[in-house]
Image: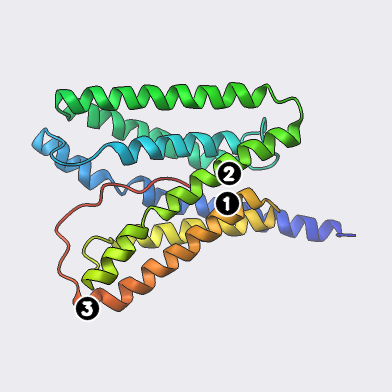
Amino acid sequence: MVSQASIQVLEICKDAAGGAGNIFAFGLFVSPIPTFQRIIRNKTTEQFSGLPYIYALLNCLICAWYGSPLISLDNILVTTVNSVGAVFQAVYIVLFIAYAEKAKKLRMLGLLLAVCSAFAVIVLCSLLIVDFEVRRIAIGFLSCASLISMFASPLFVINLVIRTRSVEFMPFYLSLSTFLMSTSFFLYGIFNFDPFVYVPNGIGAFLGTVQLVLYAYYKSASKEDTREPLLESCS
């Protein structure tokens, strides 16, 4: 049997890892700020796409819902980090809509409505599942799939870095924040015995490591980066 002392140690380690993950996530949440400073300064969204923020919002909402007590037990730090992430993405989307041209504005409004509707359907359908464990597994798989697809999004950037032998389009602090946040929540999931948390974040930590290794290897061959990253989505 697991002793009470061991349980307390696991609980402390889990809370520490989750707390660290919440802190490191801010590196991802604030990464689009330079882009929006440029948008506000120029009063136009130029060629920037709003789709990453739409997807990041949906991802944060799904993961926040999975961490809530109605879906899984003792995962409140998953809810807190993704709730904060959802607020950031919502602000970015509102700013994007405010400065976008009419066609983009209407498209973004439609996508935002679609995200809100999809999340409402997910919440209502999950609450109709009476069995708590079945509900947790259903939303857990959805959350896991959403996180894995988010962490897989930098793969095209990794391919670009290898082809061009330049890290111009792979900002260091964005890669570092991804690695630290993913590693923290990987440990959080391990300590909480939750595969829906540690599996996707383990993949994120691995891909973050790959990005950091590539950055170190190709840094000397890179030109000074003069462009701002669009975004990166939440834990």
Report the front residue among 156 and 213. Answer: 156
Query: Which circle's residue, 1 or 2, is located before the other in the chain?
Result: 1
**Mark 1, residues whose alpha carbon is within 10 Å: few (<14), some, or many (≥20)?**
many
Left/right of residue 6 with respect to residue 204 in the rendered view: right
Q: Amino acid at mark 1?
A: Gly
Q: Which label belongs to residue 220? A: 3
Label 2 and label 3: CA atoms lie apart by 39 Å
Q: Is residue 226 visible?
A: yes
Residue at the disc numbered 2:
77
Q: Nearer the viewer, mark 2 or mark 3?
A: 3
Task: Label 3: state its secondary structure.
Answer: helix
Query: Which circle's residue, 3 or 1, is located before the other in the chain?
Result: 1
Residue at the disc numbered 1:
18
Residue reaching furthest to the right: 1
Task: Label 1: state its secondary structure.
Answer: helix
- Residue 208 is situated, as x and y percent measured from the top left of the image, at 43, 63
- Residue 100 is situated, as x and y percent measured from the top left of the image, at 17, 29
